[in-house]
Image (cartoon, helix red, strand yellow):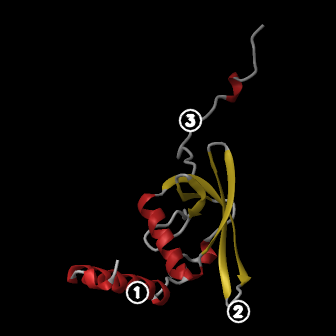
Amino acid sequence: MNFDSLHPWMIATGLCVLIAAGGLVYWLFFRKRPTAEELERARRSLLVQSGRIVDGTLLDAYEIPGEDGRTLTMLLFQYTIGGVNYECSQDITDLLHVVDVSQVRGGFPCSVRYQPGNPQSSIVVAEQWKGLRAAGPQFRLPSDPEPVDVDSLGHRDH
């Protein structure tokens, strides 16, 4: 095929394909990629919208030094799905406006949101949702129990 037999529409189509390919390559290399914080926020949002809820137990709230020099606040929790026990931690450093860490108590029950098909992807706290409970289980005692007749217990007339 020589250039004399090329029609103007062929040349225009070729130029459009080249321009589109160049634009795609430019976009792939120079686009703004999401930060780790943005990705984590999107993951939490997805779990709030479509995650399943299961009962879990808070194990601890602790602080560790981060790679960037700041202190990270972590929440350690466990839960069971389908007979499999999971123990996970969640970085709640950016959620301290939602959670009062001094109120987190190990051993208290909590609600855990997890991703079906990927149960190790789980959270206890997000911007729009908290699975923390204010206190442990409350058991109601009767306010005025019936008195027990002690004389009738254990005595038999022979």
Side of 114 where 62 appears, left or right: right
Farthest-out residue, bottom: 69
Mark 1 or mark 2, whichever is nearer to me: 1
Between 13 and 153, the residue placed more toward the observer is 13
Residue type at mark 3 is Glu
Q: Position of residue 79 (x, y in %)?
A: 64, 54
Q: Residue 146: which numbered mark, if any?
A: 3
Measure the C-alpha gap from mark 1 to mark 2. Answer: 40 Å
Between 53 and 143, the residue placed more toward the observer is 53
| Corner quadrant of residue 66 | bottom right
Residue type at mark 2 is Gly
Q: Earlier in the sequence, mark 3 or mark 1?
A: 1
Residue type at mark 1 is Gly
| Corner quadrant of residue 15 | bottom left
Q: Residue at x 50, y 69 (%)?
A: 43
Q: Residue 22: which numbered mark, if any?
A: 1
Q: Position of residue 84 (x, y in %)?
A: 68, 47
Image quarter of the N terminus = bottom left
Side of 129 where 136 appears, left or right: right
Q: Residue at x 41, y 62 (%)?
A: 49
- How many C-alpha atoms fall within 10 Å of the one at disc 1: few (<14), some, or many (≥20)? few
Considering only vertical position in the picture, is 64 above or below 155?
Answer: below
Q: Are marks 3 and 2 in contact (CB under 8 Å)?
A: no
Mark 3 or mark 2, whichever is nearer to me: 2
Residue wearing tag 2:
69
